[in-house]
Amino acid sequence: MDGKQWAMLLHLSQLAGVVVPGLGLAAPIIIWQVKKEQFPELDPHGKMVTNWIISLLIYCVAATLLSVVTCGFGALLFIPVAVVAIIFPILGGLKARDGILWKYPITITFLK
């Protein structure tokens, strides 16, 4: 496999969490850390995905807290969060396959 294929796999591996809880958080980071020396073009993709994962966790915590404060109405925020948690990795993977680093919208940048 070449760097573009690994980048695509890195993005799409987030969806593994649908099958095995937690795997969607760990798999992309493991792929990034193991393969970034062999494929330097993978490093920006790994940072983008890691930033997205951290941002997604923050959004889930915020939705949970808002749900508690508003007697459950904050739970409605989980719907758009779940939708983008599925759509963004797919779009990122498709762009990575073409050699493009796609910046996930609404991502908070922690790693540069």
Image (cartoon, rainbow, N blue to C red):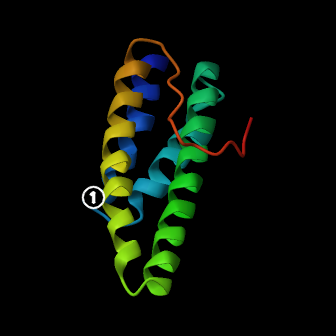
Expressed as whole percent of the image width and height from the top left, the position of residue 5 reads 39, 22
Numbered circles on residues, count: 1
Looking at the rendered image, the quarter that the C terminus falls into is: top right
Q: Is residue 74 or residue 50 the one in the foreground?
A: 74
Q: Report if residue 41 is visible in the image.
A: yes
Residue at 47%, 56% in the rendered image:
25
Q: Is residue 77 or residue 30 the one in the foreground?
A: 77
**Relative to residue 3, is residue 88 drawn left or right?**
left
Looking at the rendered image, the quarter that the N terminus falls into is: top left
> Where 72 falls versus 33 (above or below)?
below
Residue at 72%, 46% in the rendered image:
110
Expressed as whole percent of the image width and height from the top left, the position of residue 44 reads 63, 28
- The quarter of the displayed image where residue 6 is located: top left
> Where 36 falls versus 51 (above or below)?
above
Q: Report if residue 1 is visible in the image.
A: no
Residue at 36%, 64% in the rendered image:
78
Expressed as whole percent of the image width and height from the top left, the position of residue 45 reads 56, 30
For label 1, the residue is: 18
Q: Is residue 57 or residue 37 the one in the foreground?
A: 57
Element at badge 1? Answer: helix
> Where 3 falls versus 12 (above or below)?
above
- Which amino acid, by three-letter code, is at mark 1? Val
**Relative to residue 106, is residue 70 drawn left or right?**
left
- The quarter of the displayed image where residue 19 is located: bottom left
Residue furthest top in the image: 98
How many residues crowd around disc 1 within 10 Å: few (fewer than 14), some, or many (20 or more)? Answer: few
